[in-house]
Image (spheres, rainbow, N blue to C red):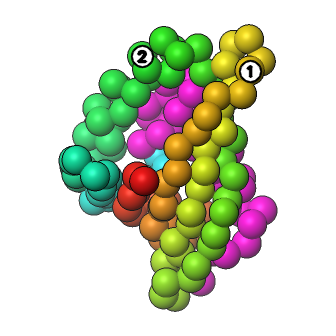
Amino acid sequence: MKASTDLDTLTEFFDRYGVALTAGDVAGVAACYALPGLVVADTYSFSFTSPAAVALSFVGAAPDYQERELVAANAVIDDVQPVSAALTMVAVEWEFLDSQGRAVPGEHYRYLLRSTPEGPVICTVVRG
């Protein structure tokens, strides 16, 4: 399997992931992850080993998106670096749109993706 550095493939993947995030589709979010998976931030880290654990870890994000009235997420791909034959590190800045059509400042993440026959999946997320 060759690591995906194709911007169309990566954009399609992050579009699907962004739709799942803003729709509160935790099963859709979970489908975007390799298992086990890892999320790392300045003040916390957590891992998950099942689709149910991924879904549970994102259940708390859905109310936050709803409270902020975020209805769309767009991933701006800032950098793509092949890491190995199957792994790619992708730097993303998320841009959000609220229910009033206003742009909402986004956040920066780095995603370590693994290429699979079905497409990319997230192995590790680094926030910051």
Q: How many marks?
A: 2
Left or right of 10: which side holds 35?
left
Residue 27 in the image: state x and y as whole percent.
44, 34
Picture residue at 58% right of the left edge, 79% below the top: 81
Nearer-N-terminus badge (2/1) = 2
Closer to us: 8 or 95: 95
Q: Amino acid at mark 1?
A: Arg
Q: Amino acid at mark 2?
A: Pro
Residue 94 in the image: state x and y as whole percent.
61, 44
Picture residue at 61% right of the left edge, 34% below the top: 105
Identify the residue under disc 1.
102
Q: Which residues are magenta?
A: 1-30
**On screen, residue 61 above or below 40:** above
Q: Is residue 109 visible?
A: yes
Residue 61 in the image: state x and y as whole percent.
40, 27
Residue 48 in the image: state x and y as whole percent.
24, 50
Which quarter of the figure is the N terminus placed in? bottom right
Identify the residue under disc 2.
63
Left or right of 98: which side holds 30?
left
Closer to us: 3 or 127: 127
Q: Is residue 3 highlighted in magenta?
A: yes
Closer to us: 42 or 85: 42
**On screen, residue 39 above or below 18:** below
